Amino acid sequence: MNPPPHPRRTPRPPQRVSSGRYSLWRLLREGIKGQRGWSRAWAKASPRPHYRVVIVGGGGHGLATAFYLATEYGIRDVAVLERGPIGLGNVGRNTTIIRSNYFHPDNIRFYEFSLKLWEGLERKLNFNAMVSQRGALNIFHTEAQRDLFTRRANQMRLLGVDAEALDREAVRRLVPLVELDNGRYPVLGGFLQPRGGTVRHDAVAWGYARAASEAGVDIVEHCEVTGLTRTGARVTGVETSRGAITAETVCLAVAGHSSRLAAMAGLKLPIESHVLQAFVSEAIKPVLDVVITFGAGHLYVSQSDKGGLVFGGAIDGYNSYAQRGALPVAEEVAASAVTLLPALARVKVLRQWGGVMDMSMDGSPIISHTPVPGLILNGGWCYGGFKAIPAGGFTTAHLIARGEPHPVAAHLDLQRFADGRMVDERGIGPFPYLH
Ligand code: FAD
């Protein structure tokens, strides 16, 4: 007698949930019916053995890449593998600032593309991400800084992007809280991008996750990638804490962990990992309705809708993977805050935290093929990757789907470091801790 045929392992179809359309009408209906009609915002998928595209990292860039692959490029056989729950990486740790006020023309085009995507994002995702274009103001204190900001504003305006030069009186009217006559750092004026502002950071992860899941993407949480599988030179899959998965393309979107993941394929990236910290104060009455950057120190501050003041400073000046805050930076940021906004001196700081940043050698990101076939890199976001999430996701999806860079991200290739074509936005050379 022949043995019974071995049961063939058929791949399980992806689990789907639909959370339905969010609307005012739905809120009213659920309110009346006791809130019983809500369902999970995205499916908790289990990994399948094979996907066309595997994206490592369920932060803003990984989720946005998956969403645009499915909705703009028709590639739905996609998994996003996240080692923890989504939204707990830098996407949920940043100071929420969005803007496109750069100097390098290619960077202006890239970040402006992102800002335009932010402007329509909530409608596109059907998710309230609290996009608030309240204005981003850089304050200057010397004539040399005035020249720099004027050049930057002119460059932006030449490319059709909004930028305004403000004199002292205009700064006073816009932000009465700023101390204009500080003996050491008198304010001479400001450089405003009215369309800059803030976005609720973790809502960005949730909104993209929900929309990507709805479009057919598997979002696999608690699935750590522990190795990259090679067939010959090519990367053909990943080893994970939940088993091996094969894929035609593997995309790394792991922010501060880019170097570690790339090393699994034998690649050494021009990236250092540093910690960047943020701080939030107790909630106070509305006092600040723009984002301010202090030109004399490394400080940026905005007020959240809950009333807390959200502060950020410079990166820790040494390499680290320790995702936590530390006192020296807290002191530095507090000193700058009190110099710029002395009326806040008695406000209490409630929380402080850190995120691991992938600082590239020229301070600009990388969206690129790598020398390893089958492996794509989205990384090197430094301080600025939150504002870039829509454009980073869109252009990474383009690169995966079309096999060639999107025109607004063509300057962000990895090869530039080998060729010496740096995208040195601030002109300060290959020193990550200075960018
Ligand atoms: P992340 O959210 O970090 O996503 C990467 C994910 O990869 C993580 O969830 C991680 O768990 C996962 N991962 C890592 N290794 C593995 C593995 N082996 N297997 C599976 N998953 C893995 N940018 C701005 O534009 N404006 C700002 O105001 C701003 N402020 C900031 C303030 C702070 C304090 C910090 C820390 C950052 C700030 N940034 C800001 C930068 C911005 O947050 C980051 O550049 C951006 O979020 C990085 O991209 P991401 O969202 O994809 O990263």
Image: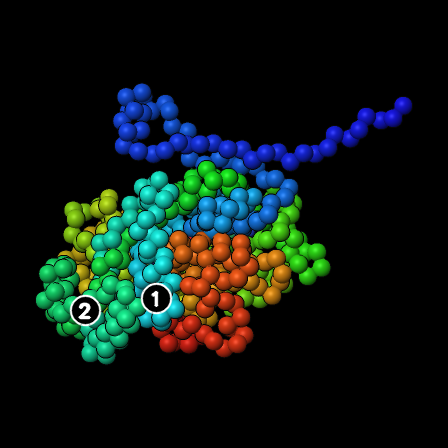
The image quadrant that residue 262 belongs to is bottom right
- Give whichever of 403, 335 is nearer the camera: 403
Quadrant of the picture in which ligand 1 is shown: bottom left
The image quadrant that residue 126 belongs to is top left
x and y percent of residue 335 in the render?
24, 63
Q: Residue at x 21, y 56 (%)?
A: 290
Contact flag, marks 1 and 2 (Cβ < 8 Å):
no
- Give whichever of 344, 346 is nearer the camera: 344
x and y percent of residue 326 in the render?
37, 58
Residue of label 2: 165
Does dot 2 land on a helix, a strand or a loop?
strand
Q: Residue at x 51, y 58 (%)?
A: 399
Would you place residue 237 above or below residue 140 in this image? above
Question: What is the three-letter code of the residue carrying label 2?
Answer: Ala
Callout 2 environment at 10 Å: few (<14), some (14 to 19), or many (20+)?
Answer: some
Q: Is residue 112 left or right of residue 17?
A: left
Q: Which quadrant is home to the N terminus?
A: top right
Colouring scheme, one of rainbow, by chain, secondary structure, one colour: rainbow
Q: Which quadrant is home to the C terminus?
A: bottom left
x and y percent of residue 351 in the render?
31, 49
Q: Which mark is residue 108?
A: 1
Q: Establish whether ligand 1 lies closer than 8 Å to the Cβ of label 2.
A: no
Would you place residue 46 above or below residue 161 in this image? above
Report if residue 281 is visible in the image.
no
- Give whichever of 10, 137 is nearer the camera: 10
